[in-house]
Image (tube, rainbow, N blue to C red):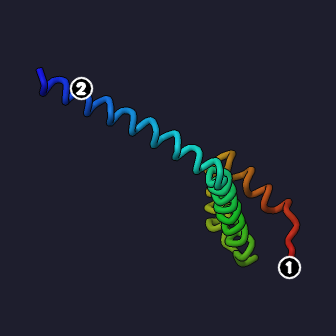
Amino acid sequence: MDIALLLLFILVALAVFVVVFLIFRAAVLWYWKIDESLAVLKEIRDLLAAQQKTQKRQSQPANQTKAERDSSAAERASMSADELELERQALATPRKD
């Protein structure tokens, strides 16, 4: 009986520890605004990726062959709606050079 009681006590203590840890973790993330910083960093990453794709397309030579033009059109057609929206946002944002 003592072993069963000891195991029950250990399981309850472990469960309490996990709950307290999760509460404190959430409080620390909220206080230091880590979730917001992470969201901003992801948005910056996505905008930079869209800008990089746009710059690659714009830097292509004007004397492309028909096959090269078709492949770039196919690449643009395969872009998701999110990627297209990010590219539009990147192009609409004024540059501060």
Is residue 95 rendered to the left or right of residue 4? right
Is residue 90 rendered to the left or right of residue 56? right
Residue denoted by label 1: 97
> Which residue is depicted at the point 12% across and 27% down?
3
Residue denoted by label 2: 8
Q: Quadrant of residue 54?
A: bottom right
Viewer-side label of 1, 2: 2
Picture layout, residue 4 above or below residue 75: above
Q: Can residue 90 be seen in the rendering of this structure?
A: yes
| Viewer-closest of 88 and 12 | 12
Q: Secondary structure at mark 1?
A: loop
Is residue 5 rendered to the left or right of residue 87? left
> Which residue is depicted at the point 63% across and 68% down?
68
> Which residue is depicted at the point 73% across and 54% down?
86
Residue sitting farthest toward the front: 2
Q: Can residue 76 be seen in the rendering of this structure?
A: no
> Which residue is depicted at the point 88% across and 66% down?
94
Q: Position of residue 33 (x, y in %)?
A: 66, 53
Q: Position of residue 32 (x, y in %)?
A: 64, 55
Q: CA distance from mark 1 to mark 2?
A: 65 Å
Count of numbered circles on the image: 2
Q: Position of residue 55 (x, y in %)?
A: 72, 71
Quadrant location, the C terminus: bottom right
Q: Position of residue 51 (x, y in %)?
A: 72, 66
| Earlier sequence position, callout 1 versus callout 2 | 2
Label 1 amino acid? Asp
Picture layout, residue 79 above or below residue 71: above
Picture layout, residue 6 above or below residue 29: above
Is residue 95 rendered to the left or right of residue 57? right
Dot 1: within a 10 Å radius of its alpha carbon, few (fewer than 14), some, or many (20 or more) residues?
Answer: few
Q: Secondary structure at mark 2?
A: helix
